[in-house]
């Protein structure tokens, strides 16, 4: 296989002209039958890395995914793009599982999503052995490591894959894994000389902000009111707090649902479905919510409480702005959150307690830091960003800096001379020339940097060491009892005279006062999207409801924004819009181009008739639906959609030739047993598939027109 076929598949199925950074290299590695470890941030395009090989290589790709909802969402998205995909998990009946297994065995699907439990079951291995497998993709691969933030024991049983399928490449993918976790993933899966791809974790479209935890409700209300009609998630620490916050927001006139693991399956599914389909905009949730949702147009994420580690925090804020459009994140921080977590961790003591406490401390340092937030996050994942981002609260209101190169050199030199074998506290004790017994017992008073920083108070050294850690000049080896290690960036300071800017200690107290004032001030108004975008957004929701799919499965916000800017009116112009592939152009192109023509009518004297008006003219000339479809190069379903819209619009069209009064009555009678918004699929299923979709579409047009006439009377 070559990248030309991959490029063609990218455009055909996904509507994109170019791969994102590193995607092409990863795909080529898979084509070359190599194992790979892929780290990309949420929304960075991990799925494409195995989906493209799956549709271009002979055989089937088996994808291991830990969440049922995520599988269902991915498979629906692939099918919407014209890709043959299925899943196997406990949500299917025995008959449904058998049907999927038959499709899998006979090579009728390109991708099969399975749960880890299904993969490691004894009954599944023989089926795998009898099928042509082209790739194993292990999604959320950090779950395999006990060092990871979401360890799943069943993942650790998957090492059998390399022994049973020696010639099948394995690609392990994750959005959040530090250096220790990455090493463990390779070891646990027994990957053979894997190519390691570390994509940039930078999500420049996400603004980052931390505020003190006082008056959170008032601040959240102001925040939301400045972002009308935008979807967002508020993460809370406890189940009770999700319900309480939801109730308070509703009391303030802001509709908000809640979601947590203590709710029934049906209740959780209902909340999630409403959010995905843009029927509700705001969810107050525990971390149980979000991992299985591939919703591209979440515009903001708020953390009501401090997350327990940076991996979780970065994964959760990554659920905003997956479409690349500007999005906001806000974290509230208080010492009480820290104490709650510490109490939980110490009461449930385990082998991982020490590392979890250390990771909590890093999260605390992030919240308290006066350094660029993005630099801290990226350095945590071993990505060295040397310039400040300009899109976080610290960069927007920067503190005073000073040349801290000498201080940094003393600290890094001490770590080096201590052979990178001690923790932060002991490094500071050595720098300050402490007389502690441990220092003399180990002979550390003889190293050259002993006492080199005795002029700086202990508390200030703590702060400076934290800054060096946040900027990537130091790192903590959690798997070696939290000793301090040097990094590549350390060498630039020690041996290449790189200058280090540190925050002045005098500004720390000043910043705390600024934070308090900022917490009480009103945020600036955000620019409202233009009117055409709103027209397209409403059309998207209408089309999604008809088909019983989430709106973002039609097109993402980013795609709609590009349509609103470029105003495509032809198929060729529409193909140039990012996110418009062949299948989506076929299914939805006419609807969106017509709306754009309607919106811009009069902009140009040469503007063509809308697609609806062209159909209306042919109807007036007594052409049949089949003839109109043939003349216009469209399918009959599209023409019936035009007919329904024209009828609703009040045009003189006769629908009785296509749906009888009796059938309209039967369909309208069925509506009383169904929930609004009425979906074609739901009505079709109500009649056990015996009522034609086009008849249902026209009956709904009759219903909507009657409703409008009544409202206008």
Image: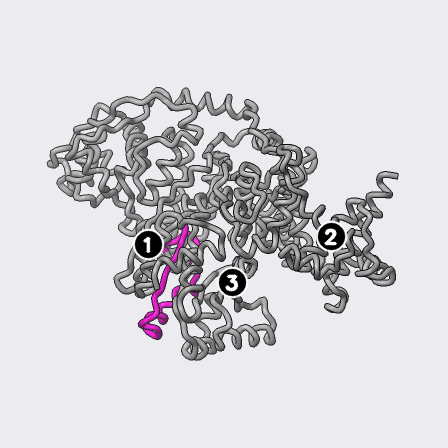
Mark closer to the chain start, 1 or 2: 1
Mark closer to the chain start, 3 or 1: 1
Q: Residue at x 13, y 40 (%)?
A: 443
Q: Residue at x 28, y 42 (%)?
A: 475
Q: Is residue 302 above or below residue 87?
A: above
The segment highlighted magenta reads: 147-176
Question: Badge 2: how crowded within 10 Å, few (<14), some, or many (20+)?
Answer: some
- For residue 36, side relative to residue 65 (left or right): left
Q: Residue at x 46, y 75 (%)?
A: 124
Instruction: Residue 228: give x, y in percent of width and height.
Output: 62, 34
Q: Is residue 169 magenta?
A: yes
Q: Secondary structure at mark 3?
A: loop
- For residue 641, side relative to residue 384 (left or right): right
Disc number at residue 430?
none
Q: Nearer the viewer, mark 1 or mark 2?
A: 2
**Between 639 and 688, the one nearer to me in the picture:** 639
Instruction: Residue 537: give x, y in percent of width and height.
Output: 63, 42
Which residue carries the number 3 mark? 83
Which residue carries the number 2 mark? 618
**Between 508 and 547, the one nearer to me in the picture:** 547
């Amino acid at each position: 296989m070559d990248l030309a076929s991959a490029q063609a598949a990218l455009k055909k199925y996904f509507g994109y002209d170019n791969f994102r950074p590193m995607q092409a290299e990863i795909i080529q590695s898979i084509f070359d039958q190599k194992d790979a470890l892929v780290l990309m941030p949420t929304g960075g395009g991990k799925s494409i890395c195995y989906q493209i090989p799956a549709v271009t290589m002979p055989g089937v790709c088996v994808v291991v995914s830990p969440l049922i909802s995520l599988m269902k969402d991915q498979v629906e998205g692939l099918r919407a793009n014209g890709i043959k995909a299925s899943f196997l998990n406990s949500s299917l009946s025995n008959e449904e599982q058998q049907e999927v297994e038959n499709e899998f065995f006979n090579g009728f699907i390109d991708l099969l999503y399975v749960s880890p439990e299904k993969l490691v079951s004894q009954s599944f291995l023989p089926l795998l052995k009898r099928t042509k497998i082209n790739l194993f993709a292990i999604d959320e691969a950090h779950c395999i490591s006990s060092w990871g933030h979401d360890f799943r024991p069943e993942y650790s049983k998957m090492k059998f894959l390399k022994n049973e399928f020696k010639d099948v490449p394995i690609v392990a993918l994750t959005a959040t894994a530090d250096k220790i976790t990455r090493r463990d993933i390779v070891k646990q899966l027994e990957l053979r000389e894997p190519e390691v791809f570390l994509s940039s974790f930078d999500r420049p479209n996400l603004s980052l902000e931390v505020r003190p935890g006082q008056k959170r409700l008032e601040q959240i209300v102001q925040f939301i009111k400045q972002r009308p009609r935008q979807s967002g998630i508020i993460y809370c620490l406890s189940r009770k707090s999700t319900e309480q916050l939801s109730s308070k927001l509703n009391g303030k006139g802001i509709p908000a649902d809640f979601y947590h693991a203590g709710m029934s399956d049906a209740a959780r599914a209902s909340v999630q479905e409403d959010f995905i389909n843009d029927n509700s905009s705001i969810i107050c949730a525990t971390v149980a919510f979000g991992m299985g949702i591939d919703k591209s147009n979440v515009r903001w994420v708020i953390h009501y409480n401090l997350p327990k580690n940076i991996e979780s925090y970065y994964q959760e804020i990554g659920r905003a702005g997956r479409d690349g459009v500007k999005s906001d994140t806000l974290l509230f921080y208080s010492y009480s959150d820290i104490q709650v977590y510490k109490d939980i961790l110490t009461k449930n003591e385990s082998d991982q307690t020490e590392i979890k406490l250390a990771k909590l401390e890093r999260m605390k340092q992030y919240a308290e830091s006066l350094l660029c937030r993005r630099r801290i996050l990226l350095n945590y994942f071993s990505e060295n960003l040397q310039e400040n981002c300009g899109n976080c609260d610290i960069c927007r209101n920067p503190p005073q800096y000073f040349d801290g190169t000498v201080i940094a050199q003393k600290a890094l030199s001490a770590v080096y001379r201590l052979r990178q074998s001690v923790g932060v506290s002991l490094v500071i004790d050595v720098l300050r020339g402490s007389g502690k017994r441990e220092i003399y017992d180990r002979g550390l008073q003889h190293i050259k940097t002993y006492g080199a920083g005795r002029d700086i108070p202990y508390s200030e050294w703590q702060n400076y060491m934290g800054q060096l850690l946040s900027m990537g000049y130091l790192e903590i080896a959690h798997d070696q009892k939290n000793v301090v290690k040097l990094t590549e960036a350390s060498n630039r300071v020690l041996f290449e005279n790189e200058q280090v800017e540190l925050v002045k200690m005098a500004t720390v107290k000043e910043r705390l006062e600024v934070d308090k004032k900022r917490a009480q001030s009103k945020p600036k108004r955000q620019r409202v999207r233009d009117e055409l975008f709103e027209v397209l957004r409403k059309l998207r929701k209408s089309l999604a409801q008809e088909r019983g799919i989430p709106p973002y499965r039609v097109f993402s916000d980013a795609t709609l924004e590009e349509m609103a800017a470029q105003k495509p009116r032809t198929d060729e112009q529409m193909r140039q819009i990012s996110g418009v592939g062949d299948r989506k152009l076929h299914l939805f192109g006419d609807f969106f181009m017509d709306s754009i023509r309607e919106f811009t009518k009069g902009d140009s004297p040469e503007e063509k008739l809308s697609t609806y008006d062209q159909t209306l003219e042919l109807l007036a000339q007594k052409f049949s639906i089949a003839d109109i479809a043939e003349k216009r190069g469209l399918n009959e379903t599209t023409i019936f959609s035009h007919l329904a819209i024209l009828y609703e619009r009040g045009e003189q069209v006769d629908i009785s030739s296509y749906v009888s009064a009796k059938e309209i009555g039967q369909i309208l009678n069925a509506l009383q047993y169904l929930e609004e918004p009425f979906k074609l699929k739901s009505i079709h299923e109500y009649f056990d598939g015996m009522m034609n979709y086009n008849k249902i579409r026209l009956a709904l047009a009759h219903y909507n027109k009657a409703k409008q006439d009544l409202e206008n009377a």
